[in-house]
Image (spheres, helix red, strand yellow):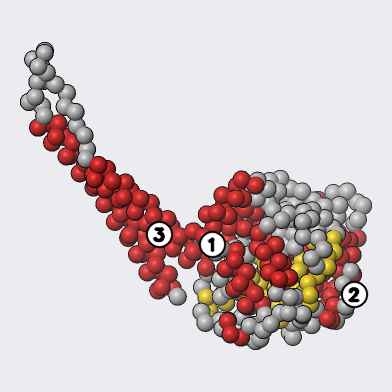
Amino acid sequence: FFLRETLNSFFGCFFFVLCLVGGFNSIHFQRIMAVKERKRNSHSYDNHNNIPSRPNVQIPTHRVLLVVAVGTLSLVAALVSVSFFLKSKTRGDPLNEDFPPLSSSASIEGRKILVVIGEGEGGAAEKLVLELANRGASLVVMRGEVGWTKWEGRFREFRGNLGTIEGQKALEKEIEDPESLSTIIFTQTLSSQPASREVNGEGIEKGLAFCYLSRRIILEGLLERGFQGRVFSMGWVGNNYKIDDFNGNFAYEKSTQLSNWIEANNALVLGFRKRHPNLEIYGANLPFHEILLMMGGGESRHVKGVVSFLSPLFSTSLDAYVEKMISVMFCKKIPSSVVFLNQYGEAIARSPYLSEEKNVDFIWSETDKLLEKAESSQGEENWWKK
């Protein structure tokens, strides 16, 4: 894999540089030809004033077309080389490129599947939900109170406040028979991480509560009541971020807090595997462009449209992403070595930070402390500063 991606990046960059050189040389050649033409015509004189006339140099059409063609090739080469480079960087290091064999995917018709989704409409979560519904799954959708109005009636749906512990527990209780669920898919994210720190009524930072704590609260409750199926926690694997200020209490930065809950969700997968050895739980990447949108601009329809349009250059199309993820999620048997998946459905390694078990335990214990303090201090202002 490493050799293949290195060669892809090398040849992509080489082709890019080659075309740039060719383009500049072509333009330089046209300038030389124009100068020669000007010198050749410099001996002509204006018949009336007997002074050298300014030559009327016209570059032949075929030369102009040649320059345009070379320039276009240079642009295409640049996009191809950048695409190779970015895809290799966002792909991770697949552990087994042959996983999963598509022929091993089981039918999903009639399976009872719970999908927990986030804010707004569009993106991978919506595409996944609709594809599962179209394939005959008995779908249960749990979501927040914002967005997703146009799909009402297509599947069973629960709405509630995913941004507070109280709301998360209430939503979890709405599932009457968790033992009948075959799969749970957590996709909830914010459309964009807030530029300044926002906390809920329990003093927990918005992104942490909505995107991370909701997964732990809901899954813990369902496990206690008999759930035994597969779980997929969607986010981004392997950013290798060292968590320090977990709740953003002291110095809030948008990118830092986004990294906090992304890495915490990876630790969540490992923590549940340790505490529930028989639980099939996996972490999986969302398309990379959706992570970029969370960093900023995700709330703007125009920015979202442009990034989504350009996403095939550095990510994967939503159709290809959903098709691959479904083939993985409902594969008859997933190898025991597989824990995390990239956006192409390939098994990848955890981040070096989470390779140390003490760091996973640290995140789990910090979460315990945060939950205990939030629940015991409800109604007490600014408890998180104490």
* SS category of the residue bearing label 3: helix
Task: Tell me what residue is drawn at x 55 percent, y 54 percent.
Answer: 309
Which residue position is annotated with label 1? 315
Contact between labelled residues 3 and 1, with CB atoms less than 8 Å apart: no
Residue 81: which numbered mark, if any? 3
* SS category of the residue bearing label 1: loop
Packing grade of label 2 (10 A; few <14, some 14-19, many >=20) is few
Contact between labelled residues 2 and 3, with CB atoms less than 8 Å apart: no
As shown in the figure, which amino acid type bears the numbered disc 2?
Glu
Q: CA distance from mark 1 to mark 3?
A: 14 Å
Q: Is residue 223 above or below residue 209?
A: below
Packing grade of label 1 (10 A; few <14, some 14-19, many >=20) is many
Task: Tell me what residue is drawn at x 9 percent, y 20 percent.
Answer: 45
Q: CA distance from mark 2 to mark 1?
A: 38 Å
Q: Is residue 71 left or right of residue 175?
A: left
Which residue position is annotated with label 2? 176
Image x and y of residue 90, in percent: 53, 64
